[in-house]
Image (tube, rainbow, N blue to C red):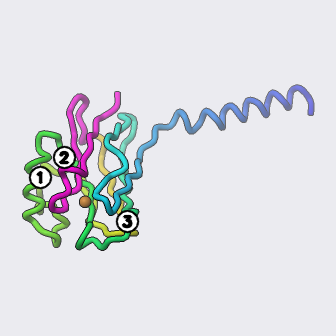
Amino acid sequence: MTIKMKNATAMLLTTLLAGPALAATCDVEIEANDAMQFNKSSIAVPASCKQFTVKLKHVGKLPKTAMGHNWVLSKAADAQGVAADGMAAGVDKAYVKAGDARVIAHTKVIGGGEADAVAFDVAKLKAGEAYAWFCSFPGHSSLMKGTLALAK
Ligand code: CU
């Protein structure tokens, strides 16, 4: 190999390695289990993302009637009201009140071994605003919750 070719190879490698680091990660995977827990407690959404996708995975075995989980996003100030109204809405509505304008995004309710994903426009998030996400299955939101913010 000539020196010129070695340089070209090194440059190509540098470009390939730097590539993924430059692009923002516009999705996150969250696991929920049979012990009523999420495996994450905070999410930072890069401001450079147009859309952000949350992939919810139920790694437990219990059916959704007993240990169903969803992922619901709202402003932190709205979370309690959204959870209360969602619980009242019932399982047919995925424990989210129909047409609830406080809900920024939500997945469906899933049981053990199932998965769902939801994408939302990052333009819906304001810098400096505190957002909250939780599972609105009855009785779960006090344990299954986290925070979300637009990253600077
Ligand atoms: Cu849950």
Quadrant location, ligand no. 1: bottom left
Residue 10: where, in percent of width, then height?
76, 30
Q: Which mark is residue 74?
A: 2
Determine the CA span between mark 2 and mark 1.
8 Å
For the magenta stretch, what is the residue range? Answer: 124-152
Q: Is residue 133 magenta?
A: yes
In the rendered structure, the answer to whether residue 89 lies left or right of residue 63 reads: left
Q: Provide the residue designation for mark 3.
A: 60
Q: Pointers 2 and 1 in contact (CB under 8 A)?
A: yes
Please state which amino acid type lies under the numbered disc 2: Ser
Q: Is mark 1 within 8 Å of ligand 1?
A: no
Can you give x and y, in whole percent of width and height, for residue 37 in the image? 31, 54
SS state under label 3? loop
Of the pair 104 and 78, the residue shown nearer to us: 78
User: What residue is shown with label 1?
Assistant: 82
Image vertical order of residue 64 relative to residue 17, above or below: below
Q: Which amino acid, mark 3?
A: Gly
Amino acid on which the number 1 mark rests in the picture: Val
